Amino acid sequence: MTPGNSWDERISAFLLSPSQFLSCTTSESFLSELLDELRDEKANDNKKVLLLSALLEHPTVLCPTTSAGEGTAQELMSILTFTPQKSISLKCHIMLAVTNVLICTSCLASRTKVAEDYLDFLFKTIQDTNDNTGGLALQPLRATACDCLREMESCNPGLLSQKLEALYYLKQQETTILHQSYCTLYTQSLKNAIRLLTREKDVDTSKLRSVLGGNEGFAWKTTGSPLSMLPFNMMTQVPQLSTMLDCKDLKSILSLLLEESYLMTPISQALLLRGLIEIVAMVPAISPAIFKSQLLRLFGTAEVELMHATLLMKGTFTDSLFTAEDEHFLIKRLVGMAQHPLLSIPEKLFYMDCILHFPENRPISSSGEECLPVLVTPRLTLSLLPTVFNDSATMLCRLNLLCLVHLEADEEEEGKGLAYLFDHLMALLKIVDNQGSREMVVTSFRAIFIFLIHFNYMEKFSEKLVNSLCDLYSRHCRLAPHLINLADRIQECLEDSLWSVQLLKALQKCIVEMPPLQLTLQDLRWHLKILGRVAQESQIVQRNTICLLLNVLINSNLCERKNWQVGNAILAVCRNLLQHPTLSQMFIELADLLQHMTKHYEDTDIQDHARFYYTLLTNLSWEKLAGVLAKGPEGGQAKVRSLSAIVAENDGVTSCLTVHQTEGCVLQLVKIHEPGSQRAITGADNLETVDKKDLFEVYQEQFKTPGFASEITLRYNLTHTKVTDPRFDKMFTICLHFDLNDSHYVEVNDIYVPCLFRDRKAPQVILKLKPYEPYPTSLRLSAIFTTEDGLSWHTQLPDLKVSFPEIFLPIPSPLGASHEFKEEVFDLIWEATSSGDPDSSATSLFCFKTESDKLADLMKIHFEGYQIAESQDQNVWKVLFFLPPRFHVLLKIRQAEDAVQVSIATDNWELLPHVNSYLQNITAHCNMTTT
């Protein structure tokens, strides 16, 4: 195992992405380490359970072949044997892992020796009924063994078909809580055995009895195909035994199982009922009336699992088990449960879905088409009408159901019901109009979509919806994406409907006729999205759109504002207009619009695109334009290379459109050293006029003023590295991108350098950092540039390190402030810091030995730009570092007889380790101590 990597980390990484994890190792090596750790007696049980999760989640990744699975299962069984009896939970997990490996690696299907041994072990485990031998402590092992056998029977149907008598005997003997585990195991085995009999020919009563009384070995030679659950209302497709069979023994077994179902948990009952339903469906000699005694209990259940099993029974046996009265009672029960106040939202939605897909005794449609059940009428569903107080999911589910109900209702009821549903939509739109939440906005548009899917043909409602949505948009332009999405979805689902066109046309009119004073820049962005979508409709005249855009550009300062996003949105509208079938009718207006943008829009990229579109418009026919600008079905590039209509296709075009990756680093930033005192701080021009007693308060207040801007300015030269590739001798349009490695600084904007030539002076790059916390940091740096041959390249530059002294700035003071003024500020800050809040302020002492002349050199080299005052008599120097955005480090340096003492004060105690490291570095040649 790699040092420093715990098993917790390795297993988590493996489960997150097995392929990525195994790229650094092999499955064989990892599996070997895992098994070795499982054998380790010193490892605790929790750790081993964690290791087993890898085999439980991804057995075929670790055991890609049958032989690997067989070996792994053999090892796990050996580990299971030597696991102490007290480690019950670990034993259960090992059993599950063995089962998983045997099934997934086909060891069970191919009848390997380890699979036979493991099946014998499981069967021997479950034979200890009522914990007579192992005691109560081993009960979890028997429960796990039952689950493992049931899973193996499910994956290899008929495996236990020759042990039905033994399983029945064990079920009868078991009287503990595990009785339901034995019942479900027996039911699963019995169902698969019956299903296999239906595939045989000439099955007589003796054959059936021999299966029920089987007590032999495991049936390995069975079908490998899974036996699925029977479908609703498809009795003709269910394989069945002969109606002439004597099924008294089987009927007796089923009756006993039904009687025992009362003792089980709801989930186990549902599982048992599903198995029994399939068995009765396959044996026509047994009447579905065997379930009759269970119906009253099932009708009144509040358990979702049992209701689902009841509906499965209803769909399978219909009127051979359920009377018309039963059917009416059950549908009313579902309606009541769908609005029960004590049920959770998912449970209510389940009952709503059951109503919508209720299995009728005599369904109208026999072709499998989905239609509303006849019993679901407006009167029955009156209590399910949606309200604005419902949660979103419930409201939409109810609306969909009620739309279907009133779609089938008579004229009188239809008018009342539809009027209510439409009023409900209007109420939702009013909530949206009154600054409704984003969830309410989404819910409202989904509700409108559901209503229109069913009633788009009714003009009185569809026209009112169009008017209401346009009126809403005029006040809330931010709804543009929702309106576009609504139009798109309606158009997808209802190809023959013109409602989407009507909505878009009305929105176009609303935007064009809007008063100029309402046309803000933010609203214009939304309007352009709508107009771009409108321009895609061939049935809508586009001349008004072009006139509006041209008027906006001419009569506003939009062109001078250089807004790329708005310009690009206008060009998107123009692009769609170029593909419009009526292009010839608006040729002049569109040409004027594109020409105006080419000449007056003060953004180079927008001008270039406008010029390109103008060239296409004036040189190509509409058919060729549509081909050149065509997009694929997902909004991407068309599969056909349309640009070949105007330029010859060659490798150069493809190469120019690709950003290439350099093999190594070809650029670097070289630091330009400058004294810190030359770095600018703005916003401190009024301090010297303040009285001394108020100076400190005013000094602190300046950090809160909007005009105060403290930032670190670092200067670099952008140069070539030592790589002498002639392709990169001349670089153009260099974009430097910075990524922070921590959260101590504000995000750095990209920096653009026009060009870099190897034989010319290196351009200077000015990097400005605004710290949240003034700590040393590093930045990841990359660049994209263009070479002389027109190709674009991406390269990674060395990380940019910002050291602690590079953060130092001089004291924020007015330009030309006197030394006396600065010393007053120093003394005030020192006093405030030394006696300030102990949670933030701190003091310290740093000592080192040096000669007096070397101390003077040290002060000149490192502290000259930050020195506030010097006392020759007392040999004391005062130094102040300002660390943006608002912190200070103050030094009083005193020459004593035996050492130099540096007293430190700061208003941020977390800076002390960095200060200490800095002083150690600059005095490294001296013998120093720190306190």
Image (cartoon, rainbow, N blue to C red):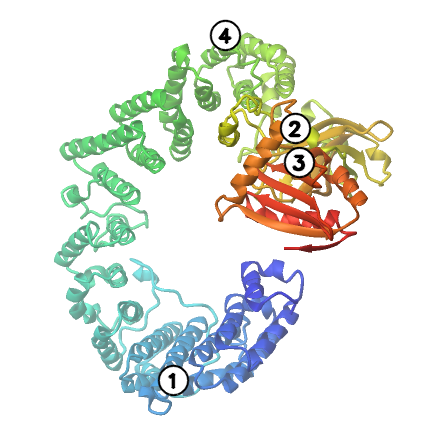
Q: Which residue is mark 4?
A: 555
Callout in the foreground (4, 2): 2
- Asked if the residues shown at circle 2 and circle 3 are in contact, with their CB atoms under 8 angstroms apart, the answer is no
Q: Which residue is mark 1?
A: 138
Q: Which residue is mark 3?
A: 737
| Residue 365 placement, left or right of 489 | left
Instruction: Between residue 21 and residue 147, name the one nearer to us.
Output: 21
Work out how far the residue at label 4 is from the one at label 2, CA to CA, in angstroms: 57 Å
Work out how far the residue at label 2 is from the one at label 3, CA to CA, in angstroms: 41 Å
Sooner in the amino-acid sequence: mark 4 or mark 2: 4
Q: Which residue is mark 2?
A: 819
| Quarter of the figure with residue 453 | top left
Where is residue 646? Give x, y as percent: 69, 22
> Of helix, strand and loop, which one carries label 3?
strand
Residue in view at x 57 percent, y 61 percent:
13
Is disc 4 surrounded by few (<14), some (14 to 19) or many (20+) residues within 10 Å? few
Q: Is residue 756 visible?
A: yes
Sooner in the amino-acid sequence: mark 4 or mark 1: 1
- Type of residue at label 2? His
- Type of residue at label 4? Asn
- Type of residue at label 3? His
